[in-house]
Amino acid sequence: MSTKLTFERNISIKNKRASFEYALLDHWTAGMVLTGTEIKSIRMGKVDLSDAFCFYDGTELFVKDLFISPYEKGGNWLNHEGKRTRKLLLNRQELKKLSLKLKDVGLTIIPTRLFINDRGVAKLDIALAKGKKLHDKRESLKEKDQLREVSRNFR
């Protein structure tokens, strides 16, 4: 009896909480330094972006609290840690531009989407974001409800 693992072709995992909690200002696409079992778990779609955030350590950008579930068939010593800190790959100009914009008070960098591109490489969309106030969140909920009502009326 063999159990065959199925990998999905189009992986696009979104951080839905990010657009509700933050106003997204600028977007970038970054590569990530991953191990073999991490990419297998990503291809199975076992990723949680909701608590993840990015930070600078010197001149390098890292993502923290991005949960990639340990691979089922990875064994004990070959498997990866679920919430380890992972390095993001951007070119030097993008890192400088991002660090200069980050110096404004109240701005942070959050991951918005994890996907696998046409070449089979995992990429992370990150955004420069500013936290929303409670009344801004209420307004975004009202807009969402209005759009839902409009779409129902046109069906």
Image (cartoon, helix red, strand yellow):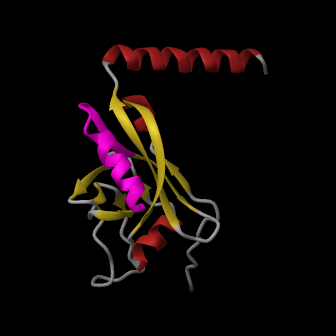
* Residue at image location 46% in from the left, 71% down from the top: 39
Residue 134 is situated, as x and y percent measured from the top left of the image, at 32, 17
Q: Is residue 121 shown above or below 53?
A: below
Q: Is residue 125 shown above or below 18?
A: below
* Extreme-left residue of the structure: 58
| Quarter assignment of residue 2 | bottom right
Q: Is residue 91 left or right of residue 153?
A: left
Q: Considering depth in this image, is 91 or 32 the residue closer to the camera?
A: 91
Q: Considering depth in this image, is 98 or 106 the residue closer to the camera?
A: 98
**Quarter placement of the N terminus:** bottom right
* Residue at image location 40% in from the left, 56% down from the top: 93
Residue 103 is situated, as x and y percent measured from the top left of the image, at 25, 39
| Quarter assignment of residue 31 | bottom left
Residue 17 is situated, as x and y percent measured from the top left of the image, at 41, 36
Q: Considering depth in this image, is 139 or 67 the residue closer to the camera?
A: 139
Q: What stretch is highlighted in magenta?
A: 90-110
What is the tally of numbered marks visible in this picture?
A: 0
Q: Is residue 94 magenta?
A: yes
Q: Considering depth in this image, is 93 or 102 the residue closer to the camera?
A: 93
Q: Does the magenta stretch include residue 135?
A: no
**Quarter placement of the C terminus:** top right
* Residue at image location 38% in from the left, 40% down from the top: 128
* Extreme-right residue of the structure: 155
Judge whether residue 10 can be spotted in this image.
Answer: yes
Judge whether residue 72 can be spotted in this image.
Answer: no
Residue 86 is situated, as x and y percent measured from the top left of the image, at 31, 64
